[in-house]
Image (tube, rainbow, N blue to C red):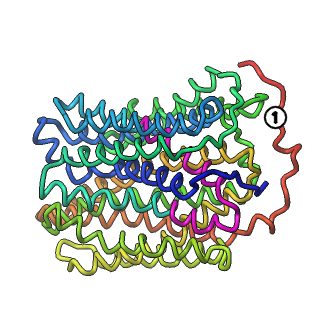
Amino acid sequence: MNKHIEVKSPKMMAFILMLGAFIGLFGETALNMALSNIMEQFSIAAATAQWLTTGYLLVLAILVPISALLMKWFTTRQLVIGGLGISLAGALLAALNVNFAVLLLGRVVQAVGTGLLLPVMLSVMMLIFPIQKRGVVMGLMGLVITLAPALGPTLSGVIISTLSWPYIFWFSAIFYVLLIAVAAAKIDNVSEITKPKIDLSSILLSTIGFGGLIFALSTMAEEAFSSPKVWAPLLAGIIALILFGVRQNTMAQPMVNLRVFKYPMFTLGTLTMFLGILIILSTGILLPMYLKGALFFSAAMAGLLLLPGNAVNFVLSPIVGALFDKVGARRFTIIGFIFVLAGNITFLATISSHTAAWQVVVAFMILFFGLTMVMMPAQTNAMNQLPRELYGDGSAAINTLNQVAGAAGTAISITVFTSGQSSYAMDFPGAAQPEILAAGIKHAFYFITGISVVGFVLSFFVKKPGEVKEVSPAAVKTTEPARL
């Protein structure tokens, strides 16, 4: 179960995969600071511009579960170079931005490339490093998963203020070119090619399920829940996901082996990561709005104010990884969620239209101090309980739910924020716009704090895989194919 595969350059393979995934995940939030500029340049409404972020998440959520199948059809080398090449094409399209349609197409194409790279990264890391080194490796991977979307507003704010927003994509394109050149020489094939039968029903149900769910969550930020634009795709998505789950559990060779969720620590770790990503993406879209709209900081300054929190993540992630085997996931997640709660409570206590900048910086640092101690241990503990043959399926499941979490966090936090603004404006008709905006942000942080409480409770149920009753092979054995 824990035997690793020998490759020529494991560290270089890890570097290529992590940097490729970092650029892709950075793209999730990189345009948050530029949305107002893009709206002005193309004369579009906020609802239209928001699809630059939503569309990205939508494509990722659709493609990531399919990638579990692709990993059984194509070699590691083909998927990595292919993913980087597709990402490069998307970045170039977006950088050229002939019109809004081309920009959106570029985002979608880039998301396809990222959707290929993410599951491959996690699966390959589990295969090429022995279990005693996984703590450090997964610490670095946790850094990629949390730092990239959190750093998006910071870096893009600086780029927008010093150059212009298309340079976000030009810089990404340069990195993709360099990574492709190195990947061609350093990536070894480690995946097992079995070429299972392609089940079109599973692909269709997965696409409708995750696509409908994220579309509904994203539309909910602008439409009432009673609107057919919200409940119709939500209902279709839920029904499709139920049918998808039933089909996977009755197939001899499922597209994604959902039996990974029979492993309790995998399920708990995946859920913990879901909550963590939800918090990261929620704060990632709320704080830039707050700093720019209520406290009147420029895009560059707003980005720089978020930098110390990201620096905490950068410094702490390798340390958490190195200490993981000694401290264990349970202690890290409990202590981590205590800090996450403390950070959110600090935001609730200080957010207003005249909050001092240092208070925002400190609260964000506390929040990310905690998140860094939650994310990597949760993911590593989850994957460590799986047998090697399920790494690809586990990776696809985690990454898919991470994208759903990102979309849910973005959509729900904006919905709660809008509701908070409306309530405050009704209660205080004479309030200035910065006060109304700050009240909406504070309202949204009640939701984020509630999520943190749920995570804190879950952290007490974390155990090491060796402390959990082993799942028998019969419990995860596939059955004969079913027919829909």
- Helix, strand or loop at disc 1? loop
Q: Is residue 124 rendered magenta in the image? A: yes
Q: Main secondary structure of the magenta part?
A: helix
* Region of the chain picked out in magenta, as a range: 112-141
Residue 291: percent from left, percent from top:
21, 66
Q: Which quadrant does the N terminus fall into?
A: bottom right
Mark 1 burial class by Cα count in 10 Å: few <14, some 14-19, many 20+: some
Q: Is residue 421 rendered magenta in the image? A: no
Kindly identify the amino acid type of the residue bearing the numbered disc 1. Answer: Thr
**Frontmost residue, 338 versus 55:** 55
Q: Is residue 356 above or below residue 204?
A: below
Q: Residue at x 42, y 61 (%)?
A: 280
Residue 63: percent from left, percent from top:
50, 34
**Frontmost residue, 220 versus 398:** 398
* Quadrant in which residue 392 is drawn: top right
Would residue 230 be found to the left or right of residue 34 on screen? right
For disc 1, the marked residue is: 478
From this viewpoint, is residue 445 visible?
yes
Q: Residue at x 69, y 68 (%)?
A: 132
* Quadrant in which residue 170 is drawn: top left
From this viewpoint, is residue 219 visible?
no
Total labels: the figure holds 1
Q: Residue at x 40, y 40 (%)?
A: 225
Q: Which quadrant does the C terminus fall into?
A: top right
Q: Residue at x 19, y 34 (%)?
A: 97
Would residue 303 be found to the left or right of residue 122 on screen? left
